[in-house]
Amino acid sequence: MQKITKKSKLILYACSGLGINMLNMIVGSYLCSALLVGGFDKNVEQWTYLNKDLVIAAVWAFLLVVAKVVDGLIDIPLSHFTDNLRSRFGKRKTGILIGIVPTLLSYLLFLVPIDTEATLLNTIWFALLLLIFYGSYTLTMLTYYATFSEIAEDDKSLLLLSNTKSICDVVYFSLSFALVPAFVSMGLNIRIVALLFIPLSLTMLIPMFLLKEKPAGNASEEAPVPTKARTSFKDCLGFTLKDKPFVFWMCIVFVMNMGLQLFLSGINEYFSTMNLDMTFIMASCFVPVPFTIMLYNKVVKRFGLGVGYRYVLAVFSLGMALMALCPLVPEGFVFIYAIICAIIVSFSIGAFFSITYTVPSQRAAIRNGESANAPSMYFAIQGLFEGASAGIASGFILVFLKQSGLVSYMTIIVTCLCMIAFGLTFLLPKTITNIGKGENYSKE
């Protein structure tokens, strides 16, 4: 794989996944809910497909859980598939194309019910499409993420990729939370809104033009290019899990992500008890990120990723701790106080996204020349840890807090989880903590 050295091209490349990520957000956050009318009080005709149930609720709930479980488990075999793919057009380009075509087809078909009533056929139809969508989306993104370690020539390039990608994540989060409800309030049905975002998926074609791959088994006229032998699934998985710095990093991510996901899943319930408008609060969390991440970059450049990570964990914990005091603030000032807390949170939330791209790519780059080359396996393992922690946060902790009437303690729990992660960062090896200080990440 040829390295991309121009900063402008790296920034463009980091924007590739924006459109596909947006479609995934729409499916998970809006389209799955649009199949049932329950829970909607306003604009029901626009928020649902046909203003009535189209799936059997109990069966649909069970199949949704199955789809989520499969989505979490399929990452690992798909990562092995994309790392060992052989094609004369280049394995990464081919992997992205194999993934993106069924992703778009299943997305479009998800907008079309087979029946106009809540039937078992409809329920199975949408569940099947969901499985296809999640599987092909995962293949597309795993292949894309695997290229980060292959096209970045040093720490600086890798951090630029990761930071730009994290800003793109903030963009599609903001578009989802702001534009989708705005379009629906204008009288557009959610299916029409879903179609409006289809053109954004064209950003995934950027790698087709920027990636310069050697066809598998081909040789240039000047020098033969050896093709790495295929490695077994067991070897790839074992190789990744034997990377002790990465496994320890996963333990920290597991704890941190529980706090982050509990915040993202429960912040609406937390502030709803105070009758606060979530639009402005969430905007205060995300809109400043492109600017606040600049400060994070300066910290990493001077002190390394270890100090940078402690900085964002400390800031996030501070924001959560201050939010915990909202019930004590006089009613006339609580909204302004909540906005201030949200702005403090914005100094960390973008960096959380960035770091999740940086470390797996760095570990893959270090071990690229060893016995098994499995860059996407690092992202697959990380996805498994993140999925498990998110499930615990939103499926157990948040449900328990809601059922027990203890939602007000949510921010305190988030603070405690992030402070535990903060303490664990002092045990990280220098190969991770020194990322960004100028050392060459390709060597231990």
Image (cartoon, rainbow, N blue to C red):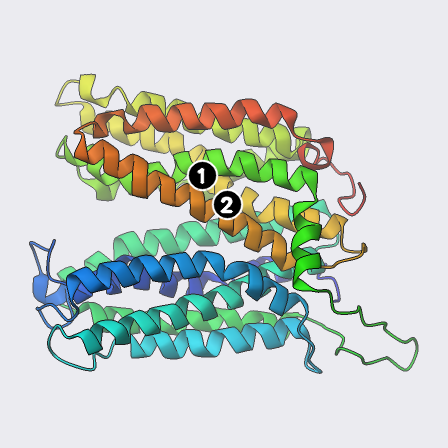
Q: Position of residue 91 (x, y in %)?
A: 66, 74
Q: Which residue is mark 1?
A: 257
- In the picture, measured across the screen, residue 72 lies left or right of residue 399, that is right
Name the residue located 18 percent from the left edge and 39 percent from the top edge. Answer: 277
For residue 21, side relative to residue 155 (left or right): left
Query: Could you tell me which secondary element the residue under label 1 belongs to?
Result: helix
**Nearer the observer, 393 or 222:** 393
Q: Is residue 59 left or right of residue 135?
A: left
Residue 408 percent location from the top left of the image: 22, 26
Check disc 1 and give the amino acid type: Asn
The answer to whether marks 1 and 2 mark residues whose Cβ atoms lie closer than 8 Å is yes
Label 2 belongs to which residue? 385
**Camera-nearest label, 1 or 2:** 2
Q: Quadrant of the N terminus?
A: bottom right
Q: Image height check: is 95 above or below 152?
A: below
As drawn, 332 above or below 102: above
Badge 1 crowding class, 10 Å Cα cut-off, few under 14, some 14 to 19, many 20 or more, is many
- Residue 4 sits in quarter: bottom right
**What residue is shown at x 71% (from left), y 51% (from top)?**
239
Amino acid type at image mark 2: Phe
Q: Earlier in the sequence, mark 1 or mark 2?
A: 1
Q: Quadrant of residue 11?
A: bottom right
At 76% from the left and 75% from the top, the residue drawn is 214
From mark 1 to mark 2, how far is it between C-alphas?
Answer: 9 Å
